[in-house]
Amino acid sequence: MKEKTMPLYAPPKRSAESSPLRLGIVGLGTVGVGVLRLLEKNAAVIAARAGCALKVVAVSSRDRHRNRGVDLSGYRWYEQPEALVDDPEVDVVIELIGGAEGAARSVVKKALQAVKPVVTANKALIAVHGVELADIAQKNSVPLMFEAAVAGGIPVIKAIREGLAADHLYWVGGILNGTCNYILSTMRKTGRDFAEILKEAQALGYAEADPSTDIDGIDTAHKLCILAALSFGMPVDFSSIYIEGIRHIGADDLHFAEKMGYRLKLLGISCLTRNGELEARVHPCLVAGGHPLGYVDGVFNAIVAKGDFIGQLTLEGPGAGAGPTATAVVADLIDVARGSTVPVWGAYHSGGSPIRSVSRDMFEGPYYIRVDVNDRPGVVADITACLRDCGVSLKSMLQEEERYETEGTFKNVPLVFITHSTLEASVMRAISLISALPQVVGQPVMIRMIGHT
Amino acid sequence: MKEKTMPLYAPPKRSAESSPLRLGIVGLGTVGVGVLRLLEKNAAVIAARAGCALKVVAVSSRDRHRNRGVDLSGYRWYEQPEALVDDPEVDVVIELIGGAEGAARSVVKKALQAVKPVVTANKALIAVHGVELADIAQKNSVPLMFEAAVAGGIPVIKAIREGLAADHLYWVGGILNGTCNYILSTMRKTGRDFAEILKEAQALGYAEADPSTDIDGIDTAHKLCILAALSFGMPVDFSSIYIEGIRHIGADDLHFAEKMGYRLKLLGISCLTRNGELEARVHPCLVAGGHPLGYVDGVFNAIVAKGDFIGQLTLEGPGAGAGPTATAVVADLIDVARGSTVPVWGAYHSGGSPIRSVSRDMFEGPYYIRVDVNDRPGVVADITACLRDCGVSLKSMLQEEERYETEGTFKNVPLVFITHSTLEASVMRAISLISALPQVVGQPVMIRMIGHT
């Protein structure tokens, strides 16, 4: 079936007297209920800004009888989310199920094929299947909106796709996962270990029962994939993004970072290399004091974008939560009501095949290397020789004698090395040499760094 | 003449093959030249994002023969800016003359009446005549865009008018003038006096030869007036905004602020009071450590917006300069090319009469009061009695004996008082009592404060 033969989407008319835009919501979790609450509480101001009322007519979720604290009796209920799409009174489909596959994917695809605008908060879906879905949206000239998919309430999609549309961006990244930022901030403030803080975060509801999507960096990578595509005007192959989480970060590393004037953050970073290739990566990163990302603590998110003309722009705000995420969903709905027709990837051309990131060998920057050693005399010379042999130039070294040495015997002592900017391939070679040294205990820890700006 | 009888603006068609959007620029100062450079350097990406080429066809400025470092030979030259508007090949008028009156005002008005979209960077014009101009724009359904008028390259107009359109905002403010922020940051870092740093800033090009618009807070008030109108959905009467500049700030005040964990910033602040009234004010302000505005140094700008659902959003970036301001101007042009039809004040209703801010008597918050006294015994008791008599509750007091007392005689000693949250009317009454005390030298300095969030 050719989508080309289907009728094109006609944006709604804008005037205070317009008939309402009729909404169907699939997925009534925290965000779905937040959207219902926001649409009800701010109905008047939303109508004035949208040019028409936004009216929920149908909902779909797994369990009809769960108490969600909102009255659902005014909405048609669908057991099957796909059936909601077929409802002729649903003008716009709001997808809040989540996940790259299954019902979320089929509902969004079906709605776009039926020339119904889609608003979604689903980062995994857009990161993994965004190219396919954007193609359908573009063929049918129907909006596919996902402001809520990246950084919750921060309007970063709009800032990049519209606000910075005139500029050539070359770097975009930031703190995109509040769970990880909460864990790392709390580790720094308390000096306690990862596992302990994670448990606490789970008890507080800041981390999921299965926290792997957050702490292993997958969630950050989904959001980075979308940001990079918009910033550089090319869909990005999600599977090519380098991803490293925060499980291996020790309290020692946060202590040394603090001591040297750095903060440790899980960052998603993407940039254009000197050869114009795409680089996209997620990993813990030492951020120099004075960098705007260094100040962002707790569950907040922040994004930095750099461009030839703009210089540097920073956005900071709540990256999750029912209220902030709902504002992003409804802002998209208002854009749909106003007749916005911004192209999905920000430019009017075929999306084409997704671009792959360069591999980690090609990453470049300064590095932090922590090596635990059990015998001091000569070991620094041996380690620095490994670095030299791999062409890695050393900037500074730190050893805190008083913390670890006791009673004349040499205990396990952490040594910290900071390198000048270097290729990651060289650093990895040096680390494999260093870890083979007889005085070295366990595996050296390597953490990437970014500078002041 | 009724504008209603004029033809309505029809947004340009969007497709890669569309004919170019033809631009006329009036005003070729720093920003005008920046726009020409940006349109040339990023022509391809701008065309892909706009759906058509953006092509300058005509320019107008005072001195045709001044060397601006760009080739103007390809553009029609108009001595009279109004004549450029009449050029039938000019689709969009870009106003970069500046100033609330004169040519800027007449050109913008004429263009809107002729149903030509206007993009402007003119904060004074929009702050003072925005209601009149928006009315014409709305009657003719023609875009009037001014992203560049507030905070240069930071897309704050878009963030508030579109990104936060679903929320009920109750507070918006920030650092809106880079010149003042540079002066205050440098005073803090160097401990030197206002007059000295101002001279230096003028030599470096960070301050104008006549710096009064910046340092007396007028420029900040223009930008605040626009932000408040968009945030609260009501045009604001510029003349009702309370404005106080930074001329009276002493090196001592920055020293004490630092010592107590505060940074001193010139802020524009607007909020809705408990009675739903508008409060808009520009003044130096002590910002608590940990507040996102406290970290912003140098010529950067930053804006904080607070809303019921979003919580708090912070945007930080370059508030001036040819490059950043040009990105904002061209982003507006891309929006025009894409057919954006966001209403001028963010809502589809008649703008109505501008709303007045409450007077300064009604302001509420904690206050910093510095009193220089020439005789110590009993003076603290006298001053605190004045505060008590006016119902002002004291939070803390600071006196640095070692800095000022010499050789057994009492010299002029600064005493610093921090109050709990209180009405400004009470503080002003207390200060007038205090300044009448015989031990008090000169006029007490009063500086407003904001808390952690």
Image (cartoon, coloured by chain):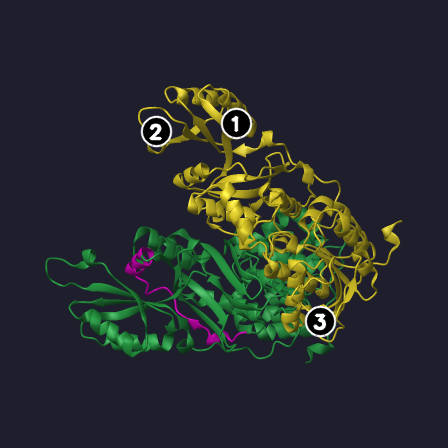
Chain colours: A green, B yellow
Amino acid type for the residue under numbered disc 3 = Ala
Does residue A206 appear anywhere in the picture? no
Total residue callouts: 3
Magenta extent: A236-259
- Sequence-wise first label, 3 or 1: 3
- Depicted B185 relative to depicted B405: above or below: below
Q: Position of residue B85 (x, y in %)?
A: 81, 59
Residue B112 falls inside the magenta stretch: no
Amino acid type for the residue under numbered disc 1 = Val
Q: What residue lies at 75% left-to-right and 52% top-to-bottom?
A: B104
- Viewer-closest of A198 and B157: B157
Residue A252 falls inside the magenta stretch: yes
Residue B405 circle label: 2
Q: Is residue A15 left or right of residue A342?
A: right
Judging by the rendered image, the residue that carries numbered circle 3 is: B53
Give neighbour class at mark 3: few <14, some 14-19, many 20+ (Cα, 10 Å): many
- Viewer-closest of A378 and A221: A378
Q: Chain of mark 2?
A: B
